[in-house]
Amino acid sequence: MNEVEKAIHRYSNSGRNEGYQLGYSNGYRLGSCQAVLNRIPEEHHPVRNMKVVYIPQGFDAIDLGITESLRGLVKDLIVAGSAEMMSVVPRERPDLVLVMNGLHVFPPEHHDHMDQIRQLGIKTALWLADDPYFTDYTASNVHHYDYIFTHEQNCVSFYKELGCSQVHYLPLAMSPVTFHPKHVATQYLSDICFIGNAFWNRVSLFDTLAPYLADKKTVIAGGHWDRLSRYDLLKDRIRHGWVPIEETTNYYNGAKVVINIHRPTEAGSDNNNSRNIIGTSINPRTYEISGCGTLQITDVRDDLSLLYRPGYDIETFSTPEELQQKIEYYLQHEEERIRIALRGLHTTRRKHMYTDRLERLLDIVFRS
């Protein structure tokens, strides 16, 4: 047994006592999670004497994590909407304007404003979190920025070929303030949970698993799940529409197993990727689920093995049959389920925080 295994073993054993002492109703899991967190060394990041303007993308799970982290990394942080950017930036004269994604809530004409900001001698950076799904749009926007960061490795060469000289791979991460182990009310408890919109690859998978899932305490939340051909089997287990971040963390914490299925990358009605750039990056949910200390079973992306260890701190599947078999196995083997979840929590908190990613971003932008 190596040192990490010994540590996880100690965490699991001490977790029972710690959990009950903390008063958690499900003391074993939460106590074990707390034992893991207690043994992670606290990191101290130097505060840089600089001013940053951050333009959020309008998705709290990412925006809150970035603003929380930047406040601990730079002396002065200003969060501004895209509409007020051109009044705030010339007045404040920051060292950097960081735009998250530049999609959805960022009008196309505002990318042209970045050229005016650059003419003031202010550095600009764009961190793309939806690659490669919207590359038809991002292809026309990236040349307005000094630095391009993308969570998709396959898009690095793509943006360089478009003429961008500073393009860097920067995976996403998660915020422990938002995603963490916690006690939840009984309405959030489930055997199996999935949160996300019904892209067609997900529809096909859940149609195949519908008879099995209908016999379990299952929660499926998101939009367009009326696409299911076996909708009647699962309709009582579907919560339609957007799930706020706070409730998302509740569902993750209340589940025994959380399924993670990446959306397809092929061009079509759900994507704007006419070049059919293949997606290799893992989605934000990968970090967020593991950050809640819950077992995750995910489909495989190439980047996964760079960031986690399948079979050790995260579980994977390739076919609906394999997914069903693994769900059933881990529902029957609680100790093993929790042990892998604890390793996932440990890996996430040690290696995949937004603070770590943003420190790398600032190092690249301001390196001598």
Image (spheres, rainbow, N blue to C red):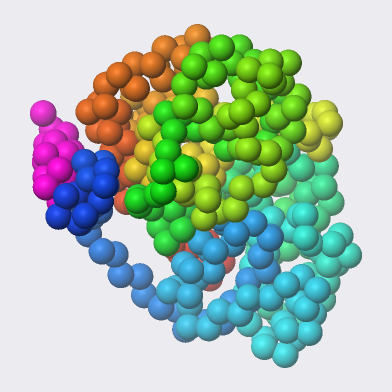
The reply, left or right, for residue 86 in relation to residue 15 is right
**Does residue 11 show up magenta in the picture?**
yes
Most distant residue in the bottom direction: 91
Using the rendered view, name the quadrant where residue 356 is placed: bottom left
Question: Residue 10: where, in percent of width, then height?
Answer: 11, 41
- Image quarter hosting the N terminus: top left
Residue at the image position 76 percent from the left and 77 percent from the top: 85
The reply, left or right, for residue 345 in relation to residue 323 is left
| Residue 8 appearing in the image | yes
Question: Residue 312: where, in percent of width, then height?
Answer: 30, 29
Residue at the image position 40 percent from the left and 57 percent from the top: 176
Residue at the image position 79 percent from the left and 33 percent from the top: 270
Q: Would you say the magenta stretch is mainly helix, strand or loop?
A: helix
159 or 198, nearer to the observer: 198
Q: What range of the chain is rendered magenta?
A: 1-18
Using the rendered view, name the quadrant where residue 336 is placed: top left
